[in-house]
């Protein structure tokens, strides 16, 4: 056989041997990547929040060999959304309707996990037309009352109290640490700020209908309002600072708590007779600047005020004029009586008691009627509802403790009343005219509001076409949120 033929035969044999070796050994070493197993099913799916038209779902993240690319969320056989994170907001739902949701994971190779356990939820009743506005005080974070614990499903707005007015007469943070620095579980390095403001932002993600105000001033920080309102230049600077503040920190509006124009408030506050007119001009400037920013952002920014219940306040402001610039006029319709008086009294009586021993008795109803007579439309008028009361000590044992002399006392939250006083040696009474409860044990008298009295106030709001109710404050409620539940229920259509 010629040499070339031998070489050809040798090559064929070598190729055959190589093929056999590859088939038995090499294929194992150089095989294409195998098809990895599908990701595990998402676990512990829960309802993190709900409204009348939305549900927020959350679940434990799945893990697999390739990493989850996204999750698919199903209502029955219909996919309602996808999310790269282990949470999703389902929107466009019907009020008071039951839904069943399941979640599955999809990895980067397209492999799909089984569905996790389903979760069934019923959306809330249709949100009432009435506003339910709750104040949250920034300092509450230090006593363990956190924004994340707020039931946003029963609120329409939250007023965050308070921002201050700086030496330059512009809005500034009230408590930098609590507002934007304090870290909470789940905060990430990518977030622009932390603290309570970040928690408000997250709460709004859980409850998309919720709107937030930054409340400016209050009893302690109203000292510079008169100066800020004094001239067109100072009003402009103040209003522009307000717009910059809410756009930076994600608020939907500004709540002006000037306590008080012309007279009243802290003795050190600046006060002028022209505060009456300047307050109107300040609100007009705020409305102009908020509307201008709203056009840029494609949204409507809100403006509200908080006013005292007494006639002195209505005399010192131009309610009929300023009401056109605000969305809400919130009346602080509480503190009609307290431990500063010489005798025990009712904190927030709905109706005036003709048997009162006080020479100038008033009531929540008187305050609401006074504001309407002064020119505030009912559709903008908000009734203040206290979630706290007053405890009077060393009370004369007459008339079940009402309208009696006393020595000493303190404010008490509804939560404290429920845990420490109600049913513990105290008898509860409901005033037949004023429609508010009080407790008496023979020596101590407590005036407060409870679910029954709040039901009467909610009925009054609806019967008189008022805009809604304002709460001072959310952290004063009992652990089960009994007062907020009663108020929300009472305001439903």
Image (cartoon, rainbow, N blue to C red):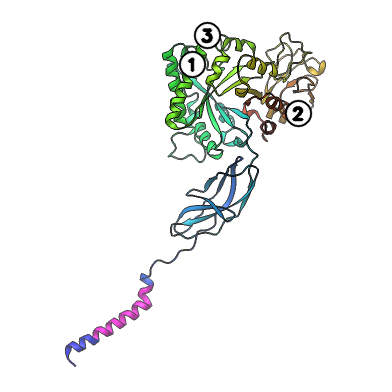
- For the residues labelled 3 and 2, the Cα–Cα distance comes to 43 Å
- For the residues labelled 1 and 2, the Cα–Cα distance comes to 45 Å
Q: Which residues are magenta?
A: 10-27
- For the residues labelled 1 and 3, the Cα–Cα distance comes to 15 Å
Query: Looking at the rendered structure, which numbered label has been put on residue 422?
Result: 2
Image location (x, y in percent) of residue 265: 57, 12
The reply, left or right, for residue 272 in relation to residue 453 is: left
**Viewer-side label of 1, 2:** 1
Residue at the spot of label 1: 282
**Viewer-side label of 3, 2:** 3
Image location (x, y in percent) of residue 31: 38, 70
Q: Residue at x 47, y 24 (%)?
A: 173
Q: Nearer the viewer, residue 88 or 99?
A: 99
Regarding mark 1 in the picture, which secondary structure is present there? helix
Image location (x, y in percent) of residue 16: 31, 83
Query: Quadrant where the N terminus lies?
Result: bottom left
Q: Nearer the viewer, residue 134 or 321?
A: 321
Quadrant assignment, res 476: top right
Query: Looking at the rendered structure, which numbered label has been put on residue 271?
Result: 3
Q: Which comes sooner in the sequence, label 3 or label 2? A: 3
- Pointer 3 with pointer 2, Cβ within 8 A: no
Q: Is residue 445 above or below residue 198?
A: above
Quadrant assignment, res 459: top right
Query: Residue 22 colored magenta?
Result: yes
């Amino acid at each position: 056989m010629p040499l070339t033929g031998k070489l050809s035969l040798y090559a064929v044999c070598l190729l055959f041997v190589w093929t056999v070796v590859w088939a038995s050994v090499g294929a194992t070493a150089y095989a294409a990547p195998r098809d990895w197993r599908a990701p595990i099913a998402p676990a512990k799916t829960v309802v993190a929040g709900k409204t009348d038209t939305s549900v927020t779902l959350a679940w434990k993240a799945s893990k697999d060999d390739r990493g989850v690319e996204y999750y698919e969320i199903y209502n029955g056989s219909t996919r309602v959304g996808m999310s790269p994170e282990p949470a999703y907001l389902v929107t466009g739902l019907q009020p008071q309707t039951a839904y069943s949701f399941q979640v599955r994971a999809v990895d980067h190779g397209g492999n799909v996990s089984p569905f996790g356990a389903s979760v069934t939820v019923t959306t809330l009743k249709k949100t009432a037309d009435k506003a339910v506005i709750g104040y949250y005080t920034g300092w509450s974070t230090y006593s363990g009352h956190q924004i994340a614990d707020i039931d946003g499903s029963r609120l329409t707005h939250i007023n965050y109290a308070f921002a201050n007015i700086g030496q330059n007469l512009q809005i500034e943070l009230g408590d930098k640490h609590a507002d934007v620095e304090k870290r909470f579980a789940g905060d990430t390095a990518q977030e622009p700020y932390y603290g309570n403001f970040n928690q408000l932002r997250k709460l709004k993600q859980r409850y998309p209908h919720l709107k937030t105000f930054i409340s400016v001033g209050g009893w302690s920080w109203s000292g510079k309002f008169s100066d800020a309102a004094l001239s067109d230049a100072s009003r402009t600077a103040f209003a522009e600072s307000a717009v910059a503040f809410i756009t930076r920190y994600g608020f939907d509006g500004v709540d002006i708590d000037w306590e008080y124009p012309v007279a009243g408030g802290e003795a050190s506050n600046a006060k002028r007779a022209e505060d009456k007119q300047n307050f109107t001009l300040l609100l007009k400037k705020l409305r102009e600047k908020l509307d201008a920013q709203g056009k840029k952002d494609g949204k409507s920014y809100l403006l509200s005020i908080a006013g005292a219940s007494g006639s002195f306040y209505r005399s010192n402001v131009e309610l009929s004029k300023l009401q056109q610039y605000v969305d809400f006029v919130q009346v602080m319709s509480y503190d009609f009586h307290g431990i500063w008086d010489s005798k025990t009294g009712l904190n927030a009586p709905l109706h005036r008691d003709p048997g009162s021993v006080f020479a100038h008795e008033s009531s929540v109803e008187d305050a609401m009627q006074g504001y309407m007579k002064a020119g505030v439309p009912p559709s903008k008028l908000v009734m203040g509802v206290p979630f706290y009361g007053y405890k009077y000590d060393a009370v004369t044992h007459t008339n079940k403790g009402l309208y009696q002399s006393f020595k000493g006392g303190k404010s008490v939250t509804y939560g404290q009343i429920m845990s420490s006083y109600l049913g513990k040696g105290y008898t509860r009474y409901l005033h037949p005219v004023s429609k508010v409860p009080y407790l008496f044990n023979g020596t101590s008298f407590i005036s407060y509001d409870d679910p029954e009295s709040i039901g009467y106030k909610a009925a009054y709001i609806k019967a008189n076409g008022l805009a809604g109710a304002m709460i001072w404050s959310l952290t004063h409620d009992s652990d089960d949120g009994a007062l907020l539940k009663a108020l929300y229920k009472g305001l439903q259509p």
